[in-house]
């Protein structure tokens, strides 16, 4: 292939020798044509003026042409293949950190249940859109969102996730569920971003975002929604001073998964989680809180809130045992960014009361 191309250059580029001419070319000492030193200097000066030598031109032309000849074959090999649709129920932990402060170790709270590849997103802490991309979940597939309660580390990107799905090509319907004031939050998000949205509609040929979103607001536990392959039930939990706060249970043909939301140990959650395959439960490591609070302002009030509205790594095992779940997944970890708190330290407290499988959640972990 290269030899054929060089012959083509011999025809199109004046002075470029063909393969035949190269073979017939005499050794340098037998050549009668001589180039004087001054002629050589003149030629180099002309090349300098042109900015590129014939040799450089030929090298570049060969590289570009060969690149073009190879590109179809190469790019055919690396072309992105469509995602394979997966059946059944999957759980992916998008964000496993607790609290509103950004950190380097974990994203804020968000999880997703995929039922036959349809995503059911639970909570929308900071970074949820990007985490879905990392989890290879197309934002254009967004369909359902469930908010446990209205603390920022659980709802900060509620509107942003829907917006990012919209600019990623989503054109369907999004149903969202959660406690008051989720309807007002939805409306205000659309109003806040109305300038940008209204520009993109005609400029990019998009449908209006507002009519796509259908918030469902409720204040009591019970059946939240039911589709062909999934039933979602909610229970009130104890997370003062945020009221109401909910836990959610997803029942599918092959799995039952419960999300505690933020809560102290409470009977409502234990009943909701009874016999579930997986309990995804928030947790704090109480012995390590003093070290955390030494780094943050308003430590006294913050300590009072953390201890009074969350579940310790010891009590979470008691909850899992009473509920009779098979697997306990620890999430919403506090402290969130203390590397001295090891996985073993999280597990040892829960293990005191629970004999089932215990998983310390990590961002983008699939269970």
Image (tube, grey):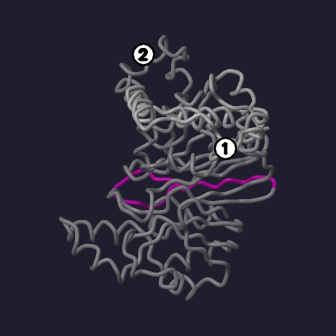
Residue 186, by quadrant, is top left
Few, some or many residues within 10 Å of mark 1 (<14, 14–19, 20+): few
Relative to 15, say whether 357 is above or below.
below
- The image's mark for residue 198 is 2
Structural distance between the alpha carbons of marks 1 and 2: 79 Å
- Sooner in the amino-acid sequence: mark 1 or mark 2: 1
Q: Is mark 2 on a helix, strand or loop?
A: helix
Residue 304's place in the image compared with 32, above or below, is: below
* Residue 2 place in picture, x, y as percent: 75, 39
State left or right for residue 289 relative to residue 211: left
Image location (x, y in percent) of residue 176: 55, 37
Say which of marks 1 and 2 sits in front: 1
Q: Do the residues labelled 1 and 2 touch (CB within 8 Å)?
A: no
As helix, strand or loop, the secondary structure at mark 1 comes to: helix
**247 above or below 42?**
below
Q: Locate the C terminus and report the quarter of the image it occupies.
A: bottom right
Of the pair 312 and 74, the residue shown nearer to us: 74
In magenta, the rendered stretch is 235-253
Please state if 314 lies on the left or on the right of 64 as rendered.
left
Using the image as rendered, state which of residue 167 and residue 54 is in the foreground.
54
Picture quadrant of residue 251: bottom right
Residue nearest the viewer, comparing 157 with 266: 157
| Residue with the mark numbered 1 | 30
Q: Is residue 278 magenta?
A: no
């Amino acid at each position: 292939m290269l030899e054929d191309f060089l012959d083509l250059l011999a025809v199109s580029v004046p002075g470029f020798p063909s393969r035949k001419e190269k073979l017939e070319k005499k050794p340098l000492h037998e050549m009668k044509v001589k180039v004087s030193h001054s002629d050589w200097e003149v030629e180099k000066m002309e090349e300098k003026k042109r900015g590129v030598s014939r040799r450089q031109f030929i090298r570049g032309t060969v590289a570009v042409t060969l690149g073009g000849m190879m590109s179809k074959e190469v790019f055919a090999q690396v072309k992105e293949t469509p995602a394979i649709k997966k059946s059944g129920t999957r759980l992916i932990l998008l964000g496993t950190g607790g609290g509103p402060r950004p950190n380097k170790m974990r994203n804020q709270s968000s999880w997703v249940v995929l039922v036959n590849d349809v995503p059911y997103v639970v909570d929308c802490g900071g970074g949820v859109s990007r985490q879905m991309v990392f989890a290879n979940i197309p934002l254009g597939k967004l369909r359902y969102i469930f908010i446990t309660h209205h603390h920022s580390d659980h709802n900060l990107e509620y509107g942003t996730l829907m917006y990012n799905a919209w600019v990623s090509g989503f054109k369907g319907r999004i149903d969202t569920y959660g406690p008051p004031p989720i309807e007002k939050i939805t409306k205000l998000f659309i109003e806040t971003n109305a300038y940008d949205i209204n520009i993109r509609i005609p400029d990019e040929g998009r449908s209006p975002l507002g009519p796509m979103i259908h918030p469902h607001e409720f204040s009591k536990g019970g059946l939240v929604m039911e589709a062909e392959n999934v039933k979602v039930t909610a229970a009130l939990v104890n997370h003062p001073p945020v009221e109401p706060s909910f836990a959610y249970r997803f029942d599918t043909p092959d799995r039952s998964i419960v999300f505690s939301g933020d809560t102290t140990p409470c009977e409502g959650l234990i009943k909701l989680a009874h016999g579930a395959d997986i309990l995804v439960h928030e947790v704090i490591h109480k012995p390590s809180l003093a070290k955390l609070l030494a780094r943050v302002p308003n430590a006294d009030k913050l300590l009072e809130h953390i201890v009074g509205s969350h579940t310790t790594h010891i009590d979470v095992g008691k909850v899992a045992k009473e509920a009779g779940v098979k697997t306990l997944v620890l999430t919403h970890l506090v402290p969130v960014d203390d590397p001295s708190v090891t996985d073993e330290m999280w597990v040892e407290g829960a293990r005191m009361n629970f004999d089932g499988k215990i998983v310390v959640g990590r961002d983008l972990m699939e269970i």
